[in-house]
Each structure stands twice: as structure tokens, then as C-alpha cells.
Image (cartoon, grey):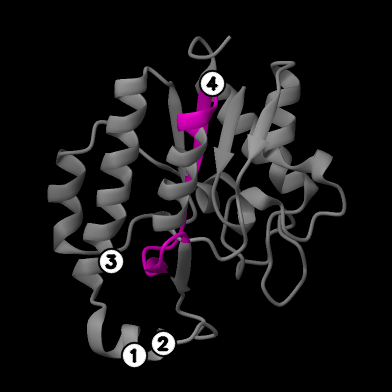
Amino acid sequence: MILFDGCSFTMGLELENTKDRFSTLVSDYYNTEHVNLAEGGKSNDGILRTTLEYCESHIIDFAVIQLTKYSRREIMERKRHYRRLNANGRERGTKEWFTKIATEEDNVANFYKNKFLLENYFSNKHIPYFFLQLSSPITSPLISSWEKMSPSSVDCIYEILGGDEHSGSPLFTSSDKPHPNAEGHRRIADHILKNLKGVFL
């Protein structure tokens, strides 16, 4: 079984058919089952949490993890109840978080904390993995030092698609907040398959 986790891009938001998601296309290529844990607006904290929870109770042959925006965070308010802190400001307490607590340095550190934990977990469990990311790493003096400690690279979805949601690329939907269309998901699936040759059979 292949595990996929991420935000709305991996969830396949705005697609008419979930069969067009890159997670389905990749698993169909290998003729194997898959699970897609992605959710719209999900943070890297949430991606780490749900991935580990699922892996602890299921046998996973391979994991494809799409890391999302640095600024998205998740906190536990009470047992088994998690609250998202996203920059769109819709969640309660978000304004206070972003104006009084969060900093770019903290967001970068949190991103790599999640990435390092996933890398170490998969390594210890002997689960092969592949990372994707929405956009290229933000410019920060901290990035190079963090990257030196990371054993794996992260491929950028926007680079795979030849532009971001504001570029007018034909691989995105035409909504106010575009996501990859069916052809965009096919492009992402092809990129993943090209990089998995010889890794997952």
C-alpha cells in the first residue's frame, strides 16, 4: 500500500473525479492499493500527525508526502482535538498567532522539525518515501543550515507544473484559488513515477 498525505493539492480539490488525482494515478500504475490522507488547509504539523498515526496501525510499502506552506500550524487544544492556525485568518485565534507569536524563523524551524521527524520515522520503519512541496523554500538565512542536516530533497510542485497558481498555467483550474487540474495531476504523477523507478516495485 502507498500512503499519500498533504493539503488540498494532494486531496485533489476542484477535480471532478478522484480517479484523476495523482495519488490514484501512481497507485494504478503499480496496481496496488493506496490511502490519501490529504485535507484542504492542512498544516505540516497535521501531515506529520496523521501520517504517523496511520503508519502505526497499517502496513505501508511506500509514502509520498506533500509538504505545505510554512506558515500553517496546528495546536492541540484538548485531547484528540486539534486547531489549525492558517494565514487566511478564518480560524479562531489566528490573528493573534500571526501578529504576536509567529515569526518567519519559527515557521522555518517548524517546517524542518516536521520534515526531520518524518525522515527519521520512515528510516527507522524502513519505509521508502518521496517528498513534494508546494513551492520553493522561502528565502531565509536559516534555510541553508537546515538543509545541510536534511538527508532528502523536496521537489517543488509549482516547478513541476511550470508555474504557480498566479501564472495562468493551463495545468491549473480557473477558480479564484486555483489547484492542479486533471492534466496537472497527471504531470505530478509522471514526475513521481520517474523518480520512483528502481525504488518501489
Q: Position of residue 97 (x, y in %)?
A: 33, 83
The residue carrying pointer 4 sits among few (fewer than 14), some (14 to 19) or many (20 or more) residues within 10 Å by Cα, namely few
Of tags 4 and 3, the one toward the viewer is: 4
The answer to which of marks 4 and 1 sits earlier in the sequence is 4
**Residue tagged 4:** 59
The residue carrying pointer 1 sits among few (fewer than 14), some (14 to 19) or many (20 or more) residues within 10 Å by Cα, namely few
Mark 3 touching mark 2, by CB under 8 A?
no
Mark 1 touching mark 2, by CB under 8 A?
yes
Give the quarter of the figure containing the C terminus: top right
Secondary structure state at the residue bearing disc 1: helix
Decide if residue 60 is in sight here.
yes
Marks 1 and 2, how far apart at CA: 6 Å
Amino acid carrying label 1: it is Glu
- Please give left or right for residue 118 compared with residue 188 in the image: left
* Residue drawn 19% across the image and 68% down it: 105
- Please give left or right for residue 168 compared with residue 72 in the image: right
Marks 4 and 3, how far apart at CA: 32 Å
**Residue tagged 3:** 107
> What's drawn in magenta, residue-wise?
55-80
Amino acid carrying label 3: it is Asn
Mark 1 touching mark 3, by CB under 8 A?
no
The dot on residue 96 is 1
* Residue drawn 26% across the image and 41% down it: 116
Marks 2 and 4, how far apart at CA: 37 Å
Q: Nearer the viewer, residue 190 or 41?
A: 41
The answer to which of marks 1 and 3 sits earlier in the sequence is 1
